[in-house]
Image (cartoon, helix red, strand yellow):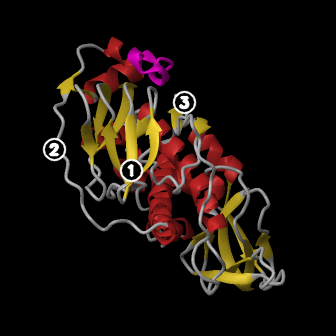
């Protein structure tokens, strides 16, 4: 087996690249830069911008540590995880250049492969399928981490809240997409494909869109009306026209972390999971933009969640206290090019990216 073929086989075994088709792996292979780690080498420091990620080779071991901001810690770093052969570290740098949440120090040296964020960004900006399959896998991994962290901060009820399916009808024409402001800037060819996948849902009053604990089967786009979001019997937020919710469970095939209920008459577009998957598999830019948007949001929420959790062995998660806001803000308005236009801090961290 040639070195090239051996590297391709190795990549197939790495979870981060498992969604990438064999014929698309070449695009990822071109990004890999062979490097050799030395014991004691610091790959990145906590708080500095992310610029690269690494795939660890044989015998390599890297420690990830943080420095708790508590008097008890005394400014000493605490090892929170180890990464070894076949694992990846620093992949959040492929999503954005935000601050590293830990310091990575090489314990045992050896070969590795580096992917620079700027090189990955070229694939991403060209809507390359391999890049968005990697991003979707990152989303799935971050969803699992954030669900676990959220559950440590505020335990879920453990109940599955049933909601009768709302009637959904096909859109009468692609022109209806313009009723949802963030869709107006989409290219016409994207609108035509999207209009065939979306369905129209209308309610006359209070109606459950989906319940906490239920399997995620669709994402929703609120055209008119208001939707309240709740968990464990507690109302978390109110969202209005122009909001997207339910996308996380569609991307990672997970369960609903909160319940969403219309507060009165409402009009929504519904994108079922099967339809989203079909758009994604065929390279539709709308689906790619959704994955990009959710990846950015999840990274931010992970950083916020990590900041709330105490160091290992130092008690429960720190509570969030906010003064009451008489005028709730929009938790999330979707920008058609994938950036967050306005993001609300909820009392419980928004895996309510059901928002």
- Chain part drawn in magenta: 178-189
Q: Which mark is residue 298?
A: none
Q: Pointer 3: what residue?
A: 335
User: Element at badge 1?
Assistant: strand
Residue 338 in the image, given as x and y percentages of width and height: 55, 35
Q: Nearer the viewer, mark 1 or mark 3?
A: 1
Mark drawn on residue 230: 1
Identify whether 238 is placed above or below 169: below
Q: Residues within 10 Å of mark 1 (few under 14, many from 20)?
A: some
Q: Residues within 10 Å of mark 3 (few under 14, many from 20)?
A: some
Across and down, in percent, residue 285 comes to: 45, 32
**Foreground of the two, 200 or 43:** 200
Residue at image mark 2? 164
Between residues 260 and 298, which one lies in front from this camera angle? 260
- Helix, strand or loop at disc 3? loop
x then y, percent, for residue 321: 62, 58
**Mark 2 to mark 1 CA distance (whole Å):** 17 Å
Q: Earlier in the sequence, mark 3 or mark 2?
A: 2
Distance between the alpha carbons at the discs numbered 1 and 3: 24 Å
Residue 30 showing in the rendered view: no
In terms of image quadrants, where is residue 272?
top left
């Amino acid at each position: 087996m040639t070195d090239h073929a051996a590297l391709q086989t190795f990549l197939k075994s790495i979870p981060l690249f498992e969604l990438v088709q064999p014929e698309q792996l070449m695009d990822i292979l071109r990004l890999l830069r062979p490097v050799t780690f030395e014991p004691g080498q610091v790959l990145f420091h906590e708080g500095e911008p992310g610029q690269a990620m690494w795939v660890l080779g044989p015998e390599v071991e890297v420690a990830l540590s943080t420095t708790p901001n508590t008097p008890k810690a005394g400014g000493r770093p605490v090892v929170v995880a180890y990464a070894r052969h076949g694992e990846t570290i620093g992949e959040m740098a492929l999503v954005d250049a935000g601050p590293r949440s830990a310091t990575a120090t090489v314990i045992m040296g050896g070969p590795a492969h580096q992917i620079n964020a700027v090189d990955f960004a070229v694939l991403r900006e060209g809507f390359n399928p391999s890049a968005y399959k990697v991003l979707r896998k990152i989303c799935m991994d971050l969803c699992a981490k954030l669900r676990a962290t959220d559950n440590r901060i505020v335990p879920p009820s453990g109940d599955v809240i049933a909601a009768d399916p709302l009637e959904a009808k096909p859109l009468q024409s692609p022109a209806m997409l313009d009723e949802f402001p963030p869709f107006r800037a989409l290219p016409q060819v994207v609108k035509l494909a999207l209009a065939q996948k979306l369905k129209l849902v209308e309610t006359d009053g209070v109606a459950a869109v989906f319940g906490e604990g239920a399997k995620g089967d669709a994402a929703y786009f609120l055209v008119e009306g208001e939707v309240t979001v709740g968990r464990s019997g507690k109302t978390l937020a109110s969202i209005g026209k122009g909001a997207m919710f339910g996308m996380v469970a569609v991307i990672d095939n997970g369960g609903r972390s909160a319940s969403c209920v219309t507060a009165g008459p409402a009009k929504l577009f519904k994108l079922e999971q099967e339809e989203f998957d079909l758009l994604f598999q065929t390279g539709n830019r709308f689906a790619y933009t959704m994955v990009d948007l959710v990846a950015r949001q999840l990274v931010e929420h992970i950083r916020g969640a990590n900041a709330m959790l105490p160091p290992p062995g130092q008690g429960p998660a720190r509570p969030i206290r906010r003064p009451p806001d008489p005028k709730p803000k929009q938790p999330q308005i979707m920008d058609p090019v994938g950036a967050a236009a306005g993001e609300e801090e909820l009392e419980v961290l928004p895996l309510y990216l059901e928002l």
